[in-house]
Image (cartoon, rainbow, N blue to C red):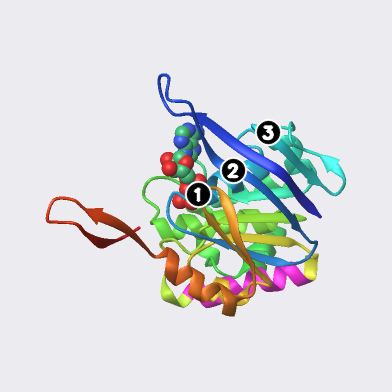
Amino acid sequence: MLELKNLYFTVPKGEGNGVRNIIDGIDFIFEDGKFYAITGPNGSGKTTLAKQIMGINPVSEGEIIFNGTDISALTITERAKYGIAYSFQQPARFKGITFRDLLTIATGIEDEHKLLEIVRRVGICPLSFLDKEVDAKLSGGEIKKIELAVTIATNPKLAIYDEPDTGIDLWTIGPMVNLLKKEMSSGQTTTIVVSHNRAFLEAADVILIIDSGKIVYSGGLEEALPLLEDLSVCTYRNTCEGDHDAECFR
Ligand SMILES: Nc1ncnc2c1ncn2[C@@H]1O[C@H](COP(=O)(O)OP(=O)(O)O)[C@@H](O)[C@H]1O
Ligand SMILES: [Mg+2]
């Protein structure tokens, strides 16, 4: 169980302008073995929250409790040892490092057959990817598939995927959703996916909508849909051409 208690991530606004709560007092319990989709407008704090759970962003105030342990002050490595894994929205690229190297670093496995077994189990990367360099030449979609495969290979207790569908072709989205569901049920992995993709929202047990650093909704898809439509536009007063309201996409 992952418990977020009155969680804040606060940054200074600039000289003498006070502070901004990017994560603004979040309380939530993620239950074991469930699939959560986090969605919400750009800049609402989804990545910031995901990075706080992994320990990439610090906790300004509040607590993160994982299976009874307060992990709020633990390093990324310590949290990884507790079984938390994270897949970046924009994965790092490494010249001279292959997919095989990343899998070996993440799992400690060097045996060729066992590595091939992992690639087959994950199923979204061709076996030929194994010796691909994870460098600038990889396409955005290829690197996301590799990142997701490495995360799954560690058999995490809690897996966090930040927009795993970015750059992914249409033919992979369905298999990716099925894969995360399958891994979740076989390993009792609690899965948190940040996504705007309908396929992930439909697959989720619980949808969380984040807006301005707060959870404004948690529950099923049906009730979430009208809220998502409301959030898709913002209204502003057009002062240049008279006194009427106009809409823009967020
Ligand atoms: N370390 C930081 N310092 C200042 N602003 C930040 C920091 N991290 C994130 N932000 C800002 O917080 C907001 C939320 O960012 P993010 O969590 O990446 O949004 P998203 O919901 O799109 O993933 C953005 O406006 C971003 O620029
Ligand atoms: Mg983001």
Tell me if mark 2 has few (under 14), some (14-19) or many (20+) residues whose alpha carbon lies within 10 angstroms of its own. Answer: some
Q: Gap in Å between the C-alphas at discs 3 and 2?
A: 10 Å
Farthest left residue in view = 241
Residue nearest the viewer, comparing 125 with 168: 168
Can residue 198 be seen in the rendering of this structure? no
Horizontal side, residue 138 vs residue 83: left or right:
left
| Horizontal and vertical percent position of residue 206 | 67, 69
- Determine which quarter of the picture holds residue 151: bottom right
Q: For the residue labelled by badge 3, is the local secondary structure a helix, a strand or a loop?
A: strand
| Horizontal and vertical percent position of residue 34 | 74, 67
Q: For the residue labelled by badge 1, is the local secondary structure a helix, a strand or a loop?
A: loop
| Horizontal and vertical percent position of residue 39 | 53, 61
Q: Gap in Å between the C-alphas at discs 1 and 2?
A: 8 Å
Q: Which numbered dot is residue 61? A: 3
**Amino acid type for the residue under numbered disc 3:** Glu
Q: Please state the extent of the stretch shown in magenta in the rendering.
A: 172-185
**Amino acid type for the residue under numbered disc 2:** Asp
Which is more N-terminal, label 3 or label 1? 3
Q: Gap in Å between the C-alphas at discs 1 and 3?
A: 17 Å
**Is 162 drawn above or below residue 19 in the view shown?**
below
Looking at the image, which residue is at 32% across and 59% down?
A: 235
Which is more N-terminal, label 2 or label 1? 2
- Residue wearing tag 2: 24
